[in-house]
Amino acid sequence: MIKKLSVVASLAITLAISSGTSVAEDLTEAIFTPFRQKEIVPVDNKQYKEECGSCHFAYQPGLLPTKSWEKLLTAEALSKHFGENAELDKDTLKVIYDYAIANAADKSFHKRSRKIAIATEHVDAPLRITEVRYIKRKHHEIPEKMIKGNKDVKSLSYCDACHTQANKGVFDADTVRIPNFPDWDD
Ligand code: HEC
Ligand code: HEC
């Protein structure tokens, strides 16, 4: 579907550029507007929120591509999930798997998901969001004492320790507050 849409979209752009008519511009706008979204889709699946939000905040499926969720969300993988047992019964696993796959980064038009999809396109499936090039780049200037050395953060994996609106799917730099280091500013 995305391929088809981009074909239509590039046709519209070509039209807009070559003819300069407002019809083509309106068409381009109409195609892009519904898809141009900020940030990331918040979690709106009750089971996902409950099961995947009990040990850490429920990472939005749009934070990883399909190929990552395919690896992370098998019965086998969940039984040794980062050193923990996060097993689910078969029915719950199916709901959560389907939900994550349907909302993975590469299927989203939201800004952060697009960046993550592009950053992971030509690499092996990352098993961590914190391994994604785009996410690493956004945090590489933050000194270790503010992350690992910070008793209220401990690891970059705990997004919601610093991103005050992570639960809403908002990761904008303006909404960040690093605990115990109130003066972080770029
Ligand atoms: C029993 C506790 C537990 C449950 C339940 C659990 N996780 Fe985790 N998860 C962890 C731990 C521990 C880590 C590693 C955190 C760290 O490295 O500090 C982790 C890490 C992750 C990461 C990688 C984060 C990063 O570093 O980028 C993802 C993605 C993830 N979990 C997804 C899920 C999903 C989806 C579910 C629901 C199916 C789930 N988790 C349920 C304990 C759990
Ligand atoms: C130690 C606190 C901390 C943790 C934990 C953390 N971040 Fe961040 N994050 C920041 C800061 C600070 C910035 C702003 C960096 C800058 O100045 O550009 C940022 C920036 C970002 C940005 C870019 C925002 C923008 O406006 O460009 C994204 C996306 C993001 N973080 C996602 C995540 C995700 C996803 C996680 C968890 C896997 C996470 N962060 C964990 C502190 C944190």
Image (spheres, helix red, strand yellow):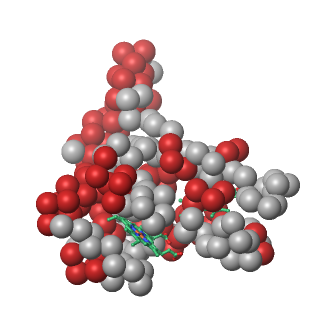
Front one among 124 and 100: 100
Q: Nearer the viewer, residue 145 or 90?
A: 90
Taking 185 as reference, is 163 left or right? Answer: left
Above-or-below relation of 161 to 133 = above
User: What is the number of callouts on the image?
Assistant: 0
Q: Is residue 173 above or below residue 27?
A: below
User: In the rendered image, is residue 119 in sight?
Assistant: no
Q: Is residue 76 visible?
A: yes
* Residue at the image point whose x is 42% and y is 58% from the top: 53
- Ligand 1: which quarter? bottom left
**Residue closest to the eye, 36 or 41:** 41
Q: Residue at x 67, y 45 (%)?
A: 175
Q: Residue at x 51, y 48 (%)?
A: 167
Horizontal side of residue 90 vs 107, given as left or right = left
Q: Please, is residue 154 above or below residue 174 in the view?
A: below
Residue 15, how many percent across, how many down? 36, 28
Q: Quadrant of residue 71?
A: bottom left
| Res 18 → quadrant | top left
Q: Residue furthest top?
A: 22
Q: Where the C terminus falls, by quadrant?
A: bottom right
Residue 37 at x, y percent in the picture = 46, 37
Toward the left, the furthest residue is 91
Q: Which residue shows up at 39% across the image and 47% down it? A: 43
Q: x, y percentage for residue 63?
A: 44, 58
Picture quarter with the N terminus: top left
